[in-house]
Amino acid sequence: MNLTGKQKANLRRLANDKPIMFQIGQSGLTEIIINNILDYLKKHEIGRISVLKSAPEEINEIIRVLGENGIYVIYRIGRVLLLYKENKELKNRIII
């Protein structure tokens, strides 16, 4: 998915109000966490996760795994990632 700078800025603005939905810690990015993130994004389309320093994977590896699952990482600030996954079935979906 290729987004323009304005589209990314709009998604960042929408995500600033949202709390961090998940933290990836010592157990790393497991299938359970990926499924929970997918379920959350199915309802909200946009969310934030935090990668703790104790996580066994590097942030770039986590971004790659999320991308393989159809989750688009819009931006990264430090150890916080903004995630987006379009859901065309939502009633109040995000129009970018």
Image (cartoon, rainbow, N blue to C red):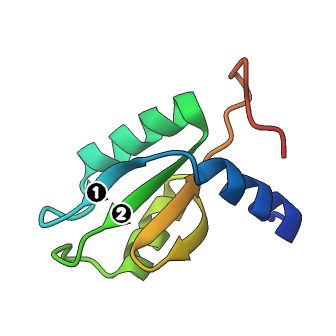
Q: Quadrant of residue 35?
A: top left
- Secondary structure, mark 2, is strand
Looking at the rendered image, the quarter that the N terminus falls into is bottom right
Horizontal side of residue 9 vs 51, given as left or right: right
Q: Among all residues in the image, which is located at the extreme left?
A: 26
In the image, is 55 to the left or to the right of 36?
left
* Position of residue 66 measured from the top left corner of the image (x, y, whole percent): 47, 60
Q: Which residue is mark 2?
A: 50
For this rendering, which residue is in front, 43 or 62?
A: 43
* Residue at 68%, 41% in the rendered image: 86
Q: Which mark is residue 10?
A: none
Q: Looking at the rendered structure, which numbered label has been put on residue 23?
A: 1
Classify 10 Å Cα crowding around label 2: few (below 14), some (14-19), many (20 and above). Answer: some
CB under 8 Å between discs 1 and 2: yes
- Tag 1: Cα neighbours inside 10 Å, few (<14), some, or many (≥20)? some
For the view shown, which residue lies furthest in the top direction? 91
Say which element carries label 1: strand
Picture coordinates of residue 88, whole percent (x, y)? 74, 29
Tell me which amino acid carries mark 1. Gln
